[in-house]
Amino acid sequence: MDHTLTPSQLNTLARDLLEGAFPLVWVEGELGNVSRPSSGHLYFTLKDARAQVRAAMFRPKSQWLKFVPREGLRVLVRGRLTLYEARGDYQLVLDHMEEAGEGALRRAFEELKARLQAEGLFDAERKKPLPAHVRRLAVITSPSGAAVRDVLSVLARRFPLLEVELLPTLVQGETAAAQITALLRRADASGRYDAILLTRGGGSLEDLWAFNDEQLARAIAACATPVVSAVGHETDFSLSDFAADLRAPTPSVAAELLVPDRRDLGARLRHLQHRLAQRQAHVLNQAMQRADRAALRLQAGSPQARLALLRQRQQAALARLHACWQRQLQQRHARLAHGNAVLRATRPGRRLALLAERLSMLAPRTQAAMARQLQRNALRLRGIARSLEAVSPLATVARGYSILTRADDGALVRSTAQLQAGDTLHARVGDGTVDVQVIDPS
């Protein structure tokens, strides 16, 4: 008798069969019905011209995608085949997804890079140092790109004496890698150049693919002439960068690495000239001193010879003094001319007129400000006087009160307890003082 299965049992059996038979698969197709609900999961279909399959990418895998999945985009995915039991449909549950074209190129790049690296093609020991002074440079690049303009501009600004030869070539397309390789080998074989620069502007991995050619990488490694690679932007890396003797992050930086700055060279040259002049003066001074001592020893018995020697030294000293005076005179003339130019530029007469005009404008304002300040001070003084008058005991006396003090010691009388019959008091009233005698202090 046949065993009867429920739908859930059948789906479970089918799911186990699918997951066991297809552990991990790579599928390339076009995205369709892309949906991303608030849960963060990603649902879509992968299709080609004849069929489609449902797929899901759960959170957090979908949060690490480096691009935004959209309708019609061709992608390469990796996942396991399973069964969605609620609908009875099989689907792919993904753990990786990348854009199809660039992803394939990226894998090819990594595989070739690993193989060449294992051969030692990128080892630091085989890289050649750049010459201290590059006199003739070959630049292999597109003659119409932005990279060549940047390189030539920086080279002209930093070191105009450099002889630059542009070797034009395609830097993108199917034949670009072969052209670049042929030009590189020809330039190296000529022996004309102190260094060779391979460069181009930024772009996608596909745009830069000519510089990931295996033959080009091997040609760079085989060059006897030092090779500098500056391909794309700072974040772009190509096999030519790894094979070259020096990798620059941008074309402009490559130009700066190849030649010194003429301003630095000028400063160094002036420093060396100064040191040379000092050394020459020191050596000449020592030689003159030795010659003087020798001449004095040889001619110590001849006054005429010594006098001639002293006259010769006097003439030399006068010549040096005259030269020094001429230099100081020239310097003072230069400072005077500079001062005259500054005076003409600043025009002190006009500045004095402007200051006088400003002073005449400010004088009324100053007087008005002083008047306002005096008025405020007068008001303030009147207020203070009123405050003092309000608390003054004399004001209290003026209203009909009196102030009593003892005649013998001048103590202020505040209470009848201080008084005795017969005491003499001074009473201060509004217009003077009256002497009174206590009859009954109670």
Image (spheres, rainbow, N blue to C red):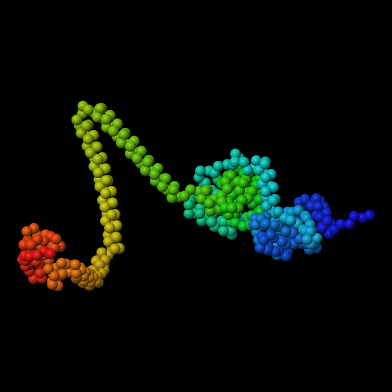
Instruction: Judge whether 333 appears above or below 436 on screen.
Output: above
Q: How many marks?
A: 0
The C terminus lies in which quarter of the figure?
bottom left
Q: Is residue 88 visible?
A: yes
Q: Nearer the viewer, residue 125 or 161?
A: 125
In this image, 399 relative to 262: left or right? left
Q: Position of residue 282 (x, y in %)?
A: 33, 37
Q: Residue furthest right?
A: 1
Q: Quadrant of residue 77?
A: bottom right
- Whether residue 244 is situated above or below residue 154 in the rendered picture: above
Q: Residue 402 vs residue 8: left or right? A: left
Q: Position of residue 390 (x, y in %)?
A: 19, 69
Residue shown at the point (27%, 61%) measured from the top left: 343
Residue 3 higher or lower than 70, as above or below: above
Instruction: Point out the image quarter for the N terminus.
Output: bottom right
Q: Residue at x 51, y 43 (%)?
A: 132
Name the residue rendered at 37%, 41% in the picture. 275
Place of residue 102 in the rendered image (x, y in percent of width and height, measured from the top left): 68, 56
Name the residue nearer the viewer: 327 or 298: 327
Q: Is 1 positioned to the left or the right of 261 in the image?
A: right
Q: Position of residue 406 (x, y in %)?
A: 9, 61
Residue ID at (22%, 31%): 305
Q: Is residue 89 visible?
A: no
